[in-house]
Image (cartoon, grey):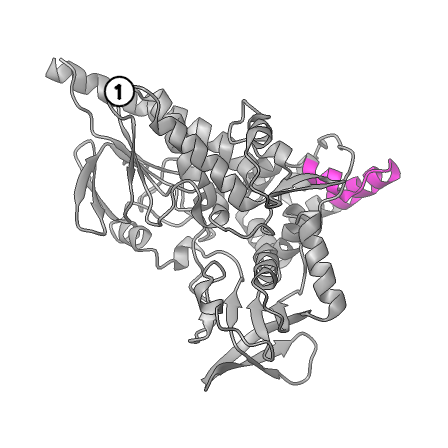
Amino acid sequence: MRTTLPPLAVIGAGFSGTMAALHLSRLMPERPVLLCEKSGAFARGLAYATGCSDHLLNVRATNMSAFPDQPEHFSRWLEACPHDGIAWTRSTPAGLFAARGLYGRYLTDLLLTALSEPGHAPRLMLENDEVVDLAPVEDGFELTLAAGRRRRVAGAILACGNLRAPRGPRSRYAVDPWDDAPLDDLRPDLPLLIVGTGLTMVDAVAALRQRRFAGPILAVSRHGLLPQVHAATAPWPAPEIPAAARASLPALLRFLRDETRRAAAAGIDWRGVIDALRGASIGLWRGLPLAEQRRFLRHVRAFWDVHRHRMAPPADEIIGRELAGGGLTLMRARVVAVEDVAGHARVTLRERGAAAPRIVDVQRIIDASGVGRVADTNDLLLRRLMERGLVRPDALGLGLAVAEDLAVLDQRGEAAQPLWTLGPLLRGTLWECTAVPDIRSQAAELARIVAARLHGVATRAERETA
């Protein structure tokens, strides 16, 4: 006699969670998969929910397939995608770049296709509510939703995506970079401040101009660095990295500078060298001693990020026009104080090298300073899991500590529960874990691991109820 098995929960329906759920629903026909999402849109997350056509993917369309074994899947989908008169793709000498909102439509199509597949019972179920707790029970967890409902699940995958940073400026004029509502009544005569000068800042500037905001924009960060731009370049072979460079950050940086010079002598720019490291980057990160990883975060991270995570050429053109026309000003500075006054915020900035602070009046402050750390998060589910001792931050505090099979380690350092994670919550362990080319392989492999473990559980349950 066949038993009804409790579902596996996937918590978070951005790219990471959606792809893990799709793979699992095909690998585990005997067990339902419960995909939980607290926002109003499944398969999009923050990254792909935008409706701004100037918010472009920072990876070429040819490398954005959701499936590692079908590299042309997204390109073929683009060819068949109906045209609605909006320029959702941009062809450049560096390749074709699609809008992030269009990529969200692609992921939604994948999810809808899976939901409509024939079967005796739904293998993939959607739960549009926030998961606020996971309490261990025999052979799984009791999952609690924000609305108060509880469900028994055989295990869970934490696919929470990028955590919001709780360290932003404290002001009633501070706004979320992904929330357009507080930007409806902007004045053209008062600056708007963006804290951060990376890809989120680039997106914010593009969205503000598309919304017809004509006022000045001031963007500040510690180094004042802009992301580099994609360009057409020939491939460079994956380098043989010596053992000394794998164990020492200074030695690794010297090796990369030398490799860049060798590539330049062959007529290939630095982009080819950085791209050639993709297959080795996780191993390089994991091989560095903890002290060297900390040194990287303090001194190298900002410079690595602007070279590794590049912007599409059309985004670079927008930023270039703004800088040349004076609409955007970049500063190497940090916010040291914010005072709310009538109608605006008075911000004190400390510029690098300046003898005295600079005070500016701004009508809004957009926090684009980056993602949060697990060690500092105010995410309700993660805080409760840490309080229960079921999870712990990694040694750097960036993400969750995990075993080799991505099972989450508890406070004792054991993977005792059927609990896994993937995507940005692995930043401290893998470092390269936030881009689609990294996550798609991770999701497929994790699905195989989880399905194999739960298949054994299902087999035992069927024997016991036969």
Please state which of residues 330 and 393 is positioned toward the viewer in this rendering.
330
Residue at the spot 46% in from the left edge and 52% down from the top edge: 398
Please state which of residues 117 and 246 is positioned toward the viewer in this rendering.
117
Q: Which residue is mark 1?
A: 30
Quadrant location, the C terminus: top left
Residue 462 lies left or right of residue 19; in this view the side is: left
Locate residue 461, reporting x and y percent: 17, 20
Residue at the spot 49% in from the left edge and 56% down from the top edge: 371
User: Is residue 196 placed above or below 31 in the rendered structure?
Assistant: below
Residue 23 showing in the rendered view: yes
* The residue stretch that appears in magenta: 255-275
Please state which of residues 453 and 144 is positioned toward the viewer in this rendering.
144
Q: Is residue 60 magenta?
A: no
Locate residue 432, reporting x and y percent: 55, 42
Locate residue 111, reporting x and y percent: 40, 32
Residue at the spot 34% in from the left edge and 29% down from the top edge: 115
Where disc 1 sits, the SS reads loop
Locate residue 1, reporting x and y percent: 13, 13
User: Is residue 118 placed above or below 92 in the rendered structure?
Assistant: above
Please state which of residues 329 and 50 is positioned toward the viewer in this rendering.
50
